[in-house]
Image (cartoon, rainbow, N blue to C red):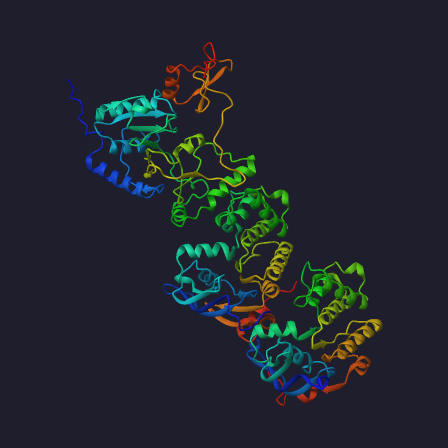
Amino acid sequence: MTATPKYNFAYLDEQTKRMIRRALLKAVAIPGYQVPFASREMPMPYGWGTGGVQVTASVIGKDDVLKVIDQGADDTTNAVSIRKFFEKTAGVETTTETGKASIIQTRHRIPETELTEGQILVYQVPIPEPLRFLEPREVETRRMHALEDYGLMHVKLYEDISRHGHIATTYAYPVKVDDRYVMDPSPTPKFDNPKMNNSPALQLFGAGREKRIYALPPYTKVISLDFEDHPFEATKFSHPCELCGARDSYLDEVITDDKGGRMFVCSDTDYCEKRLAAGHLGNSGATEAAE
Amino acid sequence: MTNEQDRIRLEDVAKKFKMHLRGGAVLPVVENVTFRVPAGKCVVLGGPSGIGKSSILKMIYGNYRTGQGRILVRDDHGWSDVATASPRRVLELRSTTIGYVSQFLRTIPRVSALDIVATAAQGIGDSEKAAKDTARRLLTKLNVPERLWDLAPATFSGGEQQRINIASGFAALRPIMLLDEPTASLDQTNCEVVIDLIEESKQRGAAILGIFHDEDVRARVADEVIDVTRFQPKVPAHA
Amino acid sequence: MSALNEQPLLSAQLISKNYGERVGCQEISFDIHEGEVIAIVGESGSGKSTLLSVLSTQLMPSAGAVHYSMRDGERRDLFSLSEAERRFLLRTDWGFVHQDARLGLRMGVSAGGNVGERLMAVGWRNYGAIRKEAGDWLDRVEIAGDRIDDMPTAFSGGMRQRLQIAKNMVTRPRLIFMDEPTGGLDVSVQARLLDLIRSFVTTYGLAAIVVTHDLAVARLLSHRTIVMRHGRVIETGLTDQVLDDPQEAYTQLLVSSIIQA
């Protein structure tokens, strides 16, 4: 019989957790500011959420209830793996219900269900620097943040409008935090940006490969960048979810057959299931439910 | 009487060129230059070619450095010594007080003849339109064909370029006019025009100092002729 | 010209810059006033570009000071300004035209975006207004309006330089630094560019410090000329006087070296 390896609670050693918590404290003290941290080797490759996992591992306690989602769904590979990882190394209770979780780790979506005080949302971030595509030099972007020199950010939006007639950025839409730092909200769709503003929850962002942590304390002002004459508009869908009929949630396109058949359903699986359980019905299925 | 007041006074002015590229050879040009030019009069510098007449004009204009002595010019505020004035002061004097018609027109690419003269005509506060009108009037007076007005003078004939030069020089009504061979490339008709312009300037009280190789023109405009051979250096040029 | 006793716009006092043993420039002093253009003329190694970098605060001097009259009238020691203040100055009250346009432009951003950047940096938030202002300036530098969305990579050398000028002018700077602005351009293109700069100087009352090795550029653009050699000032004065009646041996050599076409 092989001995199962013993892991420290939540995999990371305590000193590492302290280091990350120090970074988190700094991040919370300066909303939107990217704090460098000594990202550790994790048992998953870069690009698979190592930053988010390290943040979660540093804040999770044995009484926490963890939910993990990937593009809104609890049952995709990434979400399942990370959930299992914490089940194994921390032994914490896990759930798919947003309302029941105390920590939610997410890749690229914010849950539709409104979050409450006491909840922590941990985002997985690939590229933390919002100015990176226009200014490749790290020295220069750091200076821009330090001097609040953000003209270049609007140049990007200007270019979008001149090329496409509207601001074409649909995800990772840059925001200004607490009237000071410009931040990349991670590749969440711009549809989700308004949810970040004044949220009762604590929002933490971890980029493992880039070794940066940033944060939004609860009730922080988060405004999406725009022009006066091209104001920020959240995406609107022209049809409701075909499963549950929701008109206010972010929809995924699902290919149903190989003849081009498709349907649009809520990306947030928990939200959709809750609505179905409450009796809401969409087009697929027999009848339109009475609202 | 204001008309009799001097506008230019040279006192003991001397100049020499030091030619470093010829082993430091010194070429004296003029010395002990003392004379005055009253308002409303035309004083002519006479003498053979190479005697230093142009150099004197250029020193007064600040284009040449003065070696010794004082070159006093009077503007609305009083006397200034061009020989020791700061570069900014010289530029100020040029724009308010001293006009200059050089022998050669230095052409700037792409600027039309009309614009050259209009720019010269435009004093502080003048409208662009007024300046252009003055420019047209002068160009017409000097018989510059209208078809040339919108062209840059680089391709004009010598005589045409000279007339643009003259128009620019007379466009702004400055109290001091320095004229270096203004009629050199001109025919009889246009010589008359220049003589007219000089008369007009005298009438409004300008002090004119000029070099005219043409004896007839000189006779017509000069109130006084100064023989520049008087100012020849005692020590001749040495190698 | 306005009153002569007005304060200079920028005042350099005994500026020296050394690179270890090597002298960049030594004890350079001069003033420049609003609306004045000064040419700094010299051959390679004269220290003229070093001087320009120090004056525009891109390099720290080894000795000496540079004072500047800010827009509010206050006279400040430039090297006592915070980095934020210096960057702000460089982006609003100053301009810098590089010899290589690629250093002064963002090659991955459209012409309109390049010109609009300074406006966006000082808080302009109306896309329509930004675009219109950018379009106006492209017009003034004689770049066709339909090129506003083109990348500078598609522009000729002369167009890139004119775009650089537009990009700098949009915040109505009072002082522009130029480093060999016509370097590498065809003669006819140079003429057009110089004409543009000349007209901007008169129309907008610009002051400019132009570093050039080309005496014709100095004659065309500047009121005063400073001749440099081996880091030192050899001669200085009215441009036409320095070029027509050069006093120093080196200046005479420079002037006589021009090949007449």
Of residues A64 and C68, the one drawn nearer to the viewer in this rendering: A64
Q: Furthest-right residue in view?
A: B189
Q: Quadrant of the N terminus of chain A?
A: top left
* Residue at x 40% of width, y 44% of height: A179
Q: Furthest-front residue in view?
A: A291
Q: Is residue C109 above or below residue B233?
A: above
Quadrant housing residue B202: bottom right
Number of numbered callouts drawn: 0
Left/right of residue B138 with respect to residue B19 in the rendered view: right
Residue A89 pos. (x, y %): 22, 26
Residue A211 pos. (x, y %): 32, 38
Of residues C73 and C28, the one drawn nearer to the viewer in this rendering: C73
Q: Quadrant of the C terminus of chain A?
A: top left
* Residue at x 40% of width, y 62% of height: C79
Q: Is residue A74 visible?
A: yes
Q: Is residue C89 above or below residue B27?
A: above
* Residue at x 81% of width, y 73% of height: B193
Residue B187 pos. (x, y %): 83, 71
Q: Is residue B46 visible?
A: no
Residue C12 pos. (x, y %): 46, 68
